[in-house]
Amino acid sequence: MTGKEIKQLRLTLNLTQVELAEMLNINVVTISRWEGGKFQPSPLAQKALSALRIRQDQGRLVRNSLT
C-alpha cells in the first residue's frame, strides 16, 4: 500500500493521523512518514491496514477491534 493509498483510506474512514496511529498502536510520526512516502509500512502494519480496508469496504469498521 502506497502512502497515497494510506492517506486516502484514512480520510475515507474520517480518521486523523493520531486516531489511525492509536488504532495501529504506532507513533503518529510513522503515519506521517508513510503518507509522505518516506517509509513503507512493515508487513505486519500492511496486514493491519489491509484489514482496515476490507472492513471499510464491507461497511463494518469497528474502530477498536484492532489489537
Image: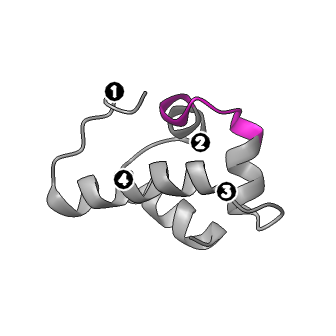
Mark 2 and mark 4: Cα distance apart in space? 17 Å
Callout 2 secondary element:
helix
Q: Is mark 4 on a helix, strand or loop?
A: helix
Q: Residue sitting at 46 percent across and 48 percent down?
A: 48
The span shown in magenta is 22-29
Quadrant of the rendered structure where residue 57 is?
bottom left
Mark 3 or mark 4: name the one nearer the start of the chain.
Answer: 3
Q: In whole angstroms, how far apart are the C-alphas of marks 1 and 4?
A: 13 Å
Residue 48 magenta-highlighted: no
To which residue does mark 2 refer? 17
Crowd tier of the residue under label 3, counting other residues whose Cα lies within 10 Å: few below 14, some 14–19, many 20 or above: some
Q: Which of marks 1 and 2 is in front?
A: 1
Please check the rendered image and state whether residue 28 is part of the magenta-colored stretch, yes or no.
yes
Give me the disc on residue 41: 3
Instruction: Compare marks 2 and 3 and give the one earlier in the sequence.
Output: 2
Instruction: Please tell me whether mark 3 sits on a helix, a strand or a loop.
Output: loop
Q: Distance between the residues labelled 3 and 1?
A: 20 Å
